[in-house]
Amino acid sequence: MTPDQIALLGLGGLVVLMAIIIAVIILSGRKQPRQPARSRRDANVSADEPPELSVRPKRPTARGWIGRGGGSSTLVHAPTEWRGTTVQVCGLWPYSIGAGTPMVGVPLGRHIHTGATVCGDPISWFQRAKLINNPSVFIMGLPALGKSTLVRRMATGLSGFGSIPFVLGDLKPDYVDLIKALGGQVIRLGRGRGNLNVLDPGESTEAAAKLRAAGFDQEAKEIEADAHGRRLTMVSALLSILRKEPPTDVEESIIDQGLRVLDRTITDRVPILADLLEVVQQGPTELREVAVDRGDFTQYQRITRALEASLISLARGGRLGETFSRPTTNPMQRDRPVVYDISGLKETDVDLRAATLLACWSNGFATVNVANTLAAAGLEPQRHYFVVMDELWQALRSGPGMVDRVDSLTRLNRSYGVGQAMITHTMRDLDSLPTEEERMKARGFVERAGMVIIGGLPQAEIPLLSAAVPVSKAEQDLLMGWSAPPSWDPATSQETEPPGRGKFLIKVGGRPGIPLSVKLTETEKSTNDTNKLWHAQSRVGQRALEVVDEIIEEREERVS
């Protein structure tokens, strides 16, 4: 490039630079447009203050339109919720959601937090839902919080599903009205109320004949053997309760042979304890052989003297009364709900209560065995039974052998084809048994239960409960809150309903609990009233009130 070209290029660059500078000066010197008055006022606002919204939102917020006149609300009411079956609400998608609680079984109540319907019972959760490993439920909670009411609802629902409720020993009674309403059988036992012959085979004789007629000879023999063993066990249990010690091996062998002699010689009626006493006194060959009297009848009488004395006490109305020494007044039936009403037995009759409970349980499970055998042979439909053992603490304390009987039931309920409900107040009821062996067995009732339903409990019970059932801190607070006493309502001068009445926590293993609230329907209220004796004013108290009114009237007349 020549020097002339370089000079010309530099001059051109200088001209372009000058043009840019002139353009910038001209643009910066232009006059700004006049701002409106509102914009000038806004410019004077402090920068710390939040700017006003200049653009209206396209849609309202969760509380309504924002701004003056927009109708924004400080309180947002929850929308109305409706519940229905899948068939009823299937067209509401996507505005419907499924329940987060089990929907299989008897409707028990509503979830406390979500309001969802809670369904459940030991038979449905075991048979249909496969949620538990055995068909049993253990219920505990302080008195007057609705434990029996919850079980009555289960019994009512299971009756509708085809299961048959059996209340084998109602001590209060709490279930008589319900069983009557279900068309069931009420069997009253006690001094002067009704008798239960422990030598009565019940429906076993009829069932054995039915099986033989259908060609099931082996099954008939099993039914008869079970009836024989049950009668032997009951006589031995009565002797144990009466003597406070079990009978000897020789005495049990004598009783066994005596029952066989009665079955062979008495065919026109059911034998009673007086007949067994007579056979023991006569000493036939079968009894003398097992007594090992060496052919000496005097020796036989010496061996059977204690047994004879005990049978005399049972047969002629000793400490256990005449409840077991006379023919059965109301035989139990296997095709309908049944309740044994033993509320007429006083709490002071400890031995009689223990013997009666054992007899009721023995008779009840003999009936279950007959029903299962006939169903297995195809002669009757399969029946499932719901066995209720309320006030379990009284049953366990009533005599020796009761803990073992319940323990065997909790282990074999699947084999028996029965669901069971055991009800007590607290864990301390199980720890108050006389021996450590019985206490350990009783704690196993809670650990083996398929479901554990817990009502209000005091704080001292929580560690004992946690040792058997895992309970979280939130669940513990819930249970302790439900145990609070009712408050006083100054407007009505009456106590309000306890905070824990009708509220329960369902626990299955280590899963989180399901808190629910049980509310009675109008139909249920008539069969769930356990305070009937308090509805009417005491006649003595009523007369006292009338006397007070008369005195007040006389004083008013004197003053006037």
Image (cartoon, rainbow, N blue to C red):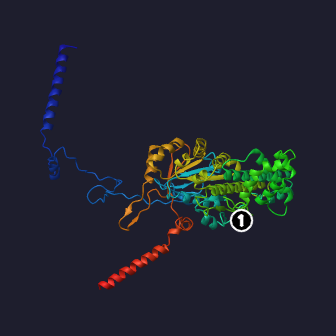
Asked if residue 300 lies left or right of residue 492, the reply is right
Asked whether the viewer can see residue 38, the reply is yes
| Residue found at the very far top of the displayed protein | 2
Residue beneath disc 1: 330
x, y (%) of residue 146?
Answer: 52, 58
Nearer to me, 494 or 12: 494
x, y (%) of residue 449?
Answer: 60, 47
Relative to 342, say whether 29 is above or below.
above
x, y (%) of residue 556?
Answer: 32, 83
Nearer to me, 319 or 122: 319
Report the number of discs: 1
Nearer to me, 387 or 53: 387
Q: Quadrant of residue 332?
A: bottom right
Asked whether the viewer can see residue 202, the reply is no
Q: Quadrant of the C terminus?
A: bottom left
Relative to 88, say whether 510 is above or below.
above
Q: Quadrant of residue 174?
A: bottom right
Asked if residue 118 lies left or right of residue 39, the reply is right
Asked if residue 152 lies left or right of residue 364, the reply is left
Asked if residue 231 lies left or right of residue 522, the reply is right
Q: Quadrant of the N terminus?
A: top left
x, y (%) of residue 157?
Answer: 61, 60
Q: Mark 1, residues whose alpha carbon is within 10 Å: few (<14), some, or many (≥20)?
A: some
Mark 1 lies on a secondary structure that is: loop
Three-letter code, disc 1: Asn
Q: Quadrant of residue 495?
A: bottom left
Q: Residue at x 26, y 58 (%)?
A: 68
Relative to 383, say whether 434 is above or below.
above
